Amino acid sequence: MTRARPQWVLPVSLLVALLLMLMPLPPAVQPLRPYWLALVLAYWVIENPDHVGLGVAFIIGLLGDLVTGSLFGEQALRLVVMAYILQRFRARLRFFPMSQQALAIGGLLLNDCIVTAAIHIAVGSQPLHPLRWLSPVTGMVLWPLAYVALDSLRHGRWRAR
């Protein structure tokens, strides 16, 4: 017998990730901002691959582009690349200890920085800020917290018993 899972967690978590991307930060810390949308999407691709895949990654990426005002399609491409890699290695990654999962997510976020730099070079826009290359470390550190928070919401462990 399976328990009914709260259906609101997926859209609300993606909405919160979009809002966290808009949260103002001091200019010195701005380049270190984790890619919240990628962290939340990574959780859902790993834990709920039947509902979240490349199509959802593309649509969420387009929404992210609209919300942040970035080059239209940039985040969509970045998130689709990340979702594809996660889908490919999901079976192994899901059973890694949390520390190894965090390292893998850090690697994926570093790959995201490389894809972003390639897009910026291809369109001739401003290159990435040098500190932007440290944002995967921020995401890697925050991955265990994000994973546990989303997992407890998805399983309904946030309710008082």
Image: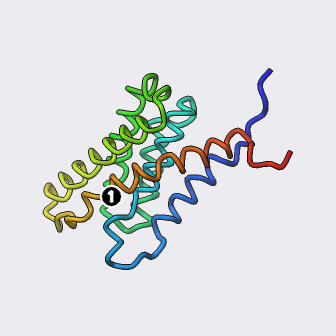
Is 54 situated above or below 29? above
The N terminus, quarter of image: top right
Instruction: Name the residue rendered at 78%, 34% in the picture.
Output: 4
The picture places residue 100, in percent across and down from the top left corner, at 40, 35
Is 150 situated above or below 22? above
**Which residue does the numbered mark 1 point to in the structure image?**
135
Nearer the observer, 24 or 124: 24
| Quadrant in the picture for residue 35 | bottom left
The picture places residue 9, in percent across and down from the top left corner, at 66, 48
The C terminus, quarter of image: top right
Instruction: Name the side, left or right, on which 126 lies relative to 49.
Output: left
Nearer the observer, 16 or 142: 142
User: Dot 1 surroundings within 10 Å: few (below 14), some, or many (20 or more)?
Assistant: many
| Tally of numbered discs | 1
Instruction: Name the residue rendered at 42%, 54% in the picture.
Output: 62
Instruction: Name the residue rendered at 19%, 59% in the picture.
Output: 120
| Quadrant in the picture for residue 64 | bottom left
